[in-house]
């Protein structure tokens, strides 16, 4: 069907979309550059989507930096910056929801019950508005990528969902627009999440295949620091995000912690040869 | 956004889609003809969508008549007949749902809890696969039309949803693929639904503006026949489908009855001048 339709619609294959909530950092910039290299026309959307924030979360406080964002897009030769209006996107009688079940119920979905439903609804809208041939997402939010890939597959959206590497500071700390929420010393303690995941990856590289032991290894690195709460830390199948007991194939190490009321998530993908 | 995108996608404006569950009758034919008159390319989809049938409903027994359907499409000069494969549309790991809330919870939604969610999910898929400029729906399933119009608006689908008149037999009985489920004498009794709605319409034309009185008028016509259960019979706002107390603007008279285990729905739209 899509092959047939594309023949009637030959020009719809050139747009790349980078959907963001603004407050652009080097991570977003790398997504834009990837889009710039592979697409004729690059669209960046800037929209802090209220649907994906829980009632006790940071919607009001989420950083807004439109003029810097526009400058960044100009520097990166973006063709169109799409800044939707809140009331245009969600008018008063808005009542439609796009939801992914199994994949979106795990991990972040358990911690943030309405979050992914907000993401999948707004992403569906953006994909319909822009109709990009490719849409670019960062590995930092790996579960989000999996959920969106599933949505695109299930709803037959004619867009390729592209996963781009997490951009990190020199010590490994993953970039996020929320990093400025914490003090320098909290940030130092939060770095232990990356260190824990790295320890897990090293243990697997060293031959460990029992998930419980790898998880214990990771937890040890985190436990060493106090004032830090662990939401989850797990070895999962990289496609289904199911927790594994014996590691094989492509594995993702997923972690989420809280420090000073701020959540940090990170992950590492590990490919096991045999 | 869409204006801008269409400039980059000038050929996407010519396809008309008539989504059906097959077993085509003169009602479908009129949709196809309407599409043929207004669109360059006409696509008819034939797919009995399991998601929109309740567990106790007639999915297995729903009429299938592919060779007649293909002949009908050939006669009407359809460009493409799209017959999706069940497992391609819903593979094993399928887990995404599109749902409209308020509009889909009333009337048919109360009687058939999962029905509209099945409709909105499959229609989203079909619209994404075909990307029609226009999609054609019959007034017979008026609430379905309202729900799909809402979905298209809420998710920014770039398709115009077109309502086409109900096609009736000479005595007023609305065509439906399910009409063959009942005997001739049951069909005669089911005709009283149309007669009840017509009585309501006549009462409004005669100046009646109190919904409760119009509804009483309609119910009287139905009550005259026995062996017939009324699911609902109501005067509603034609856009929101909310029940009205005082009639004004565009009103839809909605009705659903059951005879011999088979449900029949019908409706009439009444425009009130002042």
Image: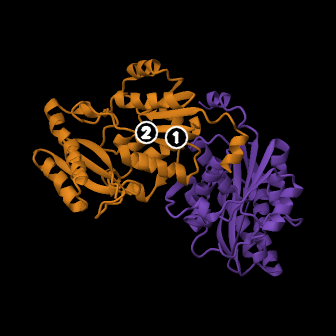
Chain colours: A orange, B purple
Q: Chain of mark 2?
A: A
Where residue A217 appears, x then y in whole percent? 17, 54
- Circles 1 and 2, Cβ within 8 Å, touching? The answer is no
Please give the count of numbered marks on the rendered protein. 2
Q: Provide the residue designation for mark 1.
A: A92
Q: Element at badge 1? A: loop
Q: Is residue A174 left or right of residue B30?
A: left
* The image quarter in which residue B26 lies: bottom right
Where residue B4 appears, x then y in whole percent? 62, 27
Q: Provide the residue designation for mark 2.
A: A137
Instruction: Say which residue appears at 58% left-offset and 53% top-offset.
Output: B103
Q: Is residue B202 left or right of residue A86?
A: right
* Residue B73 visible to the viewer: yes
- Viewer-proximal residue among A43 and B31: A43
Crowd around label 1: few <14 · some 14–19 · many ≥20 (10 Å): few
Crowd around label 2: few <14 · some 14–19 · many ≥20 (10 Å): many
Q: Mark 1, mark 2: which one is toward the viewer?
A: 2
- Viewer-proximal residue among A253 and B35: A253
Instruction: Say which residue appears at 57% left-offset and 28% top-offset.
Output: A40
């Amino acid at each position: 069907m899509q092959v047939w339709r594309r023949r009637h619609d030959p020009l719809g294959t050139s747009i790349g979309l980078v959907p963001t909530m603004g407050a652009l950092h080097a991570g977003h910039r790398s997504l834009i550059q990837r889009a710039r290299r592979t697409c004729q026309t690059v669209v960046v959307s800037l929209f802090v989507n209220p649907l994906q924030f829980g009632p006790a979360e940071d919607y009001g406080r989420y950083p807004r930096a439109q003029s810097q964002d526009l400058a960044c897009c100009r520097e990166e030769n973006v063709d169109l910056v799409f800044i939707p209006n809140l009331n245009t996107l969600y008018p008063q009688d808005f009542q439609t929801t796009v939801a992914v079940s199994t994949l979106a119920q795990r991990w972040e979905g358990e911690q943030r019950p309405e979050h992914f439903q907000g993401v999948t609804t707004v992403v569906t809208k953006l994909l319909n508005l822009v109709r990009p041939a490719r849409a670019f997402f960062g590995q930092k939010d790996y579960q989000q990528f999996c959920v969106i890939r599933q949505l695109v597959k299930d709803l037959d959206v004619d867009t390729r969902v592209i996963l781009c590497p997490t951009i990190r500071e020199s010590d490994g700390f993953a970039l996020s627009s929320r990093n400025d929420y914490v003090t320098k010393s909290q940030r130092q303690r939060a770095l232990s999440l990356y260190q824990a995941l790295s320890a897990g990856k090293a243990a697997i590289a060293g031959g460990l295949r029992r998930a419980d032991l790898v998880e214990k290894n990771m937890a040890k690195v985190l436990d060493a620091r106090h004032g830090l709460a662990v939401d989850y830390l797990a070895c999962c199948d990289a496609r289904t995000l199911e927790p594994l007991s014996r590691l094989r194939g492509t594995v993702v190490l997923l972690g989420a912690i809280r420090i000073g009321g701020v959540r940090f998530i990170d992950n590492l993908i590990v490919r096991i040869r045999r």
